[in-house]
Amino acid sequence: MLKTRISADWIIYEAMRGLFNTPFLWYHGAMDNPPAEVLTGALGRLPRVRLGCYPTPLHRLPGLETALGYPGIFIKRDDLSGLGPGGNKLRSLEFLLGEAIAGGADRVIVSGPGQSNLCTLTAAACARLSLPCTLIHNCGEDEPCTGNLLLNRIMGTESIFLGEVSAAERRSFEEQLRGELAAKGLMPYVIRHGGTSGTGALGYAETIAELRGQCSEQGFAIGTLFVSGGNGGMAAGLIYGNAVLGRPFRICVISVEDRREELREHIEKTIGEAALIAGLPFPGDLEDRCDIVDDYRGAGWGLNTPECEAAVLSFPSREGIFIEHVYSGKVIAGMEDYIRGRKIDGGVCYLHSGGFGSLFSQFTNPPPRDRFPGS
Ligand SMILES: Cc1ncc(COP(=O)(O)O)c(C=O)c1O
């Protein structure tokens, strides 16, 4: 299978591997288009559990193409990653929980707001792996049991509600719990910083190889990939994978939370960690074929903008695919603005990162019946 796709690049890579036994220091510069095996080979040495159904689908968005008069708009469906409500973080969890199991963990602890997508996806992944999981939320137990909270309840996941405390207080409780369990002889594994770490980011690096392969199989010409930037873990992994594979795509990271410089710092730090873990240096500049943009974040995480609100309502009415307010709505609003303003040319692709569970908690009132979608 692999051998049928052998290329001159691959032969050079194999030759260098044999010659120097430090292959990854050498392939840059020697290859314009390094084979996916450069990356998959490095990742293959890391502990991992298979959780998702990959490759996730890639298809056109005909309704949006018509509405914007722009042929060549695609979507990569990481919302259909195959476990729980789906979503991007499943790619991270394959490596994080792989590390947990390899280290002998007998319990996973993760924390987040009540509607945290990571918490629900971790609970689903732990259910699949028969690994006990504890969720810690900085919200009250009386928070309406809807969206992700309802999914957690259905799965029967142990959940601790700290009330309205800050994220820092939530994290310190997390460490306290870890210490208490360890003192009892247990081996808890804590998923910190929303799963954003070098290990977690590596889950997305492979997405670039996956997408490049799908483009060539399906005959799609995609130039730019639009993705969301929260903590920056997903963006870091994608930018890293893209650079290692010769930058087949331009990546446009739409911040949904922090200002550009802050997000850039998170991404840079996470790429550094990922490169060390994978043993593949990051070639070139962070912002070569990569834009980090904070024009669509509004006042920050979870704070809506009118453009995001419009996207959350118009996108499903055109495509039959749901997006939510915190992550996808802002990215779609940004991508549409790029397309409308012709700030871009060539095929564009939205990486749908999921968040479906939280959508059900995001409406105080249902949208008005008499609106005209997309107007
Ligand atoms: C649905 C969804 N999309 C995107 C992101 C952003 O990922 P990151 O925090 O790695 O930037 C998150 C983060 O929780 C998420 O839940």
Image: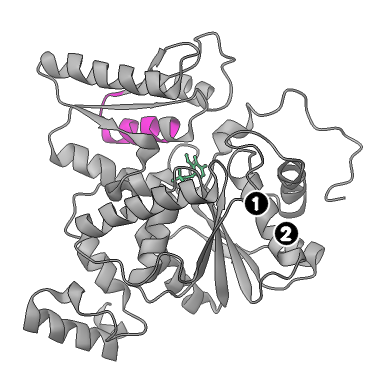
Residue lying farthest to the top in this orientation: 142
Residue lying farthest to the bottom in this orientation: 8
The amino acid marked with disc number 1 is Asp
How many residues crowd around disc 1 within 10 Å: few (fewer than 14), some, or many (20 or more)?
few
Q: Position of residue 174 (x, y in %)?
A: 31, 21
Left or right: where 252 falls relative to 245: right
Left or right: where 229 falls relative to 28: right
Mark number, residue 337 = 2
Where the N terminus falls, by quadrant?
Answer: bottom left
Q: Which residue is mark 1?
A: 295
Which residue corresponds to the image point at 57% horizontal and 38% vertical from the top-left?
356
Quadrant housing residue 181: top left
Mark number, residue 5 = none
Q: Check disc 1 and report its element: helix, strand or loop.
A: loop
Labels 1 & 2 near each other (Cβ < 8 A): yes
Q: Position of residue 173 (x, y in %)?
A: 32, 17
Left or right: where 133 falls relative to 344: left
The amino acid marked with disc number 2 is Asp
**First to last magenta residue range:** 120-133
Which residue corresponds to the image point at 35% horizontal and 23% vertical from the top-left?
171
Please tell me whether residue 44 is drawn above or below residue 156 in the rendered image: below
129 magenta-colored: yes
